[in-house]
Image (spheres, grey):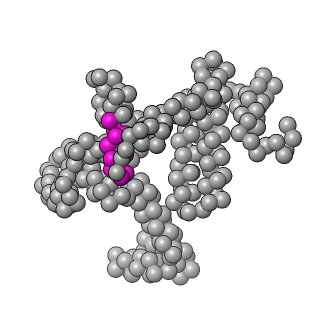
Amino acid sequence: MHPEDADSFSALKHIIARLRAADGCPWDREQTHASLKANLVEECYEVVEAIDEEDPKKLCQELGDLLMQIVLHAQIAAEAQEFEMEDVARSISDKLIHRHPHIFGQLKVKDAREVTLNWEALKREERPADGSLVASLPQQMPTLAYSQAIQRRAARVGFDWENLEGVLEKLVEEVEELKEATTQQQRTREFGDLLFTLANIARRLDIDLEVALSRANRRFQERFNHMEKVCQERGVSLESLSPEELNALWEEAKRQTKS
């Protein structure tokens, strides 16, 4: 293969097949669907991070890494005579056409809300008669993301608070119940309910809870790193500072850091 041919999707498929060949790369040859799970999840998070950083060049690179994982899984399946990459593309193409009758059919819709309602109706048709609206969500999802996803699905069929104020009142209620908990089991239960309510608030405000917490984590890390650096420059240790001095240093870090 010539370098100038490497910009096509067919070239990527050829490269992956070559890596998996009998005389290919030892690492690639020994991979399985199961062994690649962690890699796939990691690549997804790196794509999300690139989106969060609003870095188009990085996003392009990370989408390439994710695409490589998809093609590699398809190649492994093809070798086992399970399915081909073309079957993957055909499957999602058929699904998109079926779920967009307002584009590829005669259905008329007024707005995005009607599109969503029709989407859910079509998905119900695809599920078994005894299938659950929420059971199909993958249990391996991060817990916060799963919480928002399960609440989104329930909301699509009308099981939701009428307004944000009702959820905020529920949040206050959950905080009070956490305060009143007397055993570790009760505290764990009430804290879970509190997080679940926060996930609901984030969903209604169109905030991705995972992204919001990730950004908060980064802000804390950046500010704490600044505190450590200042202490090194001043020849003191964080452990030797009083609570008041630590708070003052934290406020200084908030002013000095970009986040």
Residue at the front extreme, as displayed: 106
For the point 64% across and 45% down, the residue is: 65
Question: How far from the left and from the top, in percent, is residue 11?
Answer: 76, 37
Q: Does any portion of residue 192 appear in the rendered image?
A: no
- Please provide the residue range marked out in magenta: 111-121
Residue at the right extreme, as displayed: 2
Q: Does any portion of residue 94 appear in the rendered image?
A: yes
Question: How far from the left and from the top, in percent, is residue 118?
Answer: 34, 40
In depth, the one of 54 and 42 nearer the eye is 54
Q: Is residue 109 above or below residue 245?
A: above
For the point 37% across and 44% down, the residue is: 108
Magenta stretch encompasses residue 113: yes
For the point 44% across and 40% down, the residue is: 100
User: Is residue 163 left or right of 110 when viewed as pictured?
Assistant: left
In depth, the one of 113 and 10 nearer the eye is 113
User: Is residue 132 left or right of 209 when viewed as pictured?
Assistant: left
Question: How far from the left and from the top, in percent, is residue 89?
Answer: 58, 33
